[in-house]
Image (spheres, grey):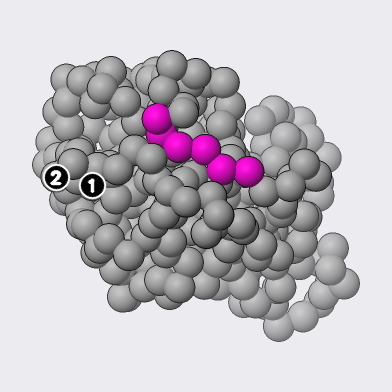
Amino acid sequence: MFNDNLLICRACGTQFDTSDRNVLKNCRICDDPRQFVPPTGQEFTTLVEMKGNYETMMAPDKTDGNIISLWTEPKFAIGQRAFLIKTPHGNVLWDLITYLDDENIRRINEEGGIQAIVISHPHYYTTHNLWAKTFGCPVYLATEDKEWLCREDPQGRVFIEGNEEEVVKGVTAVKVGGHFPGSLVLHWGDRLFIADSFVTVPSALYHEGRLPGTASFSFMWSIPNMITMPPQAIVNIWKALKPYKFTTTHGAFTGMDVRDSRVKARLLESAKIAIRAMGYEESQFIEELSE
């Protein structure tokens, strides 16, 4: 049985190993400079308290019914979405949301269940122990980010040691770093699921006739606190993704989908824009960014 009374941070959705509010006063994820504590202070809830107050929505991608996005309404914690990717070799869940109830389980099982979960970075670790137990599948995490695990229960965890790992045939987790040392993206076919390993910006969503210097992506060490990555981290992201072909990116939040045959070139352009904006107009970093 899973303990639905374990405490969950309301700000980031992370579940902890205790149900005692006298023991848990702070969320170590939110105390990290990449995150924040809300002005009202740190608050916790539980899955028991969430039931009846939240609903996890599921909807197919408008261009491919084998991609189903999942998100929680009303918005909970960070508000990210997850993706159920249906392949002939098994279903992969990319990233995670906190809330899971019987109706979600039924609907996911109707789609063929989950054979592997891959989580981009610690902000989305949420209730991964529950998901792993429920669907009897491994959870792939970057070994560099082990220190951020907030549950001792090792259920299903598989740590990615190298730069990439094929989790089922044709679906590859790629380690890009930057936001966290082990930040991941997921490559499948011509699609790249990016979470906020790099961030889809508003000017990405309508790019026709845009002036030179218009970015499609930004590169943030902290998204809410608006702290950029250093130049070398941006270069490393490009180098990790340079071998892969993709024409669509799916970001962390609803609506952050860029569908363009030039999207890979736009990623490279965005990397150059970001580095030049830091004052490195002509530098070794720019030289390292090649097609």
The answer to whether residue 174 of the structure is visible from this angle is no
Q: Which mark is residue 136?
A: 2
Mark 2 crowdedness (10 Å alpha carbons): few <14, some 14-19, many ≥20: some
Q: Residue at x 46, y 27 (%)?
A: 50
**SS at mark 2 in the image:** loop
Residue at 16% from the left image edge and 20% from the top image edge: 110
Out of 212 and 11, give the one closest to the viewer: 11
Front residue (pair 180, 210): 180
Which quadrant of the view contains residue 285?
bottom right
Residue range corresponding to the magenta coloring: 43-48
Q: Number of numbered discs present? A: 2
Q: Residue beneath label 1, please?
A: 132
- Relative vertical location of residue 170 with respect to residue 154 in this rendering, above or below: above
44 to 57, vertically: above or below: below
Tell me if label 1 and label 2 are in contact, CB under 8 Å: yes
Question: Could you say which is closer to the camera, residue 170 or residue 104?
Answer: 104
Classify 10 Å Cα crowding around label 1: few (below 14), some (14-19), many (20 and above): many
Where does the image place residue 82, in percent across and percent down from the top left?
Answer: 42, 36
Between 169 and 43, the one nearer to me in the picture: 43
Circle 1: residue type: Ala
- Kindly give the residue lying farthest to the front in the view shown: 22
Q: Is residue 14 left or right of residue 219?
A: left
- Rendered-image quadrant of the N terminus: top left
SS state under label 1: helix
Q: Position of residue 231 (x, y in %)?
A: 70, 73
Q: Is residue 286 above or below residue 107?
A: below
Q: Callout 2, which amino acid?
A: Gly
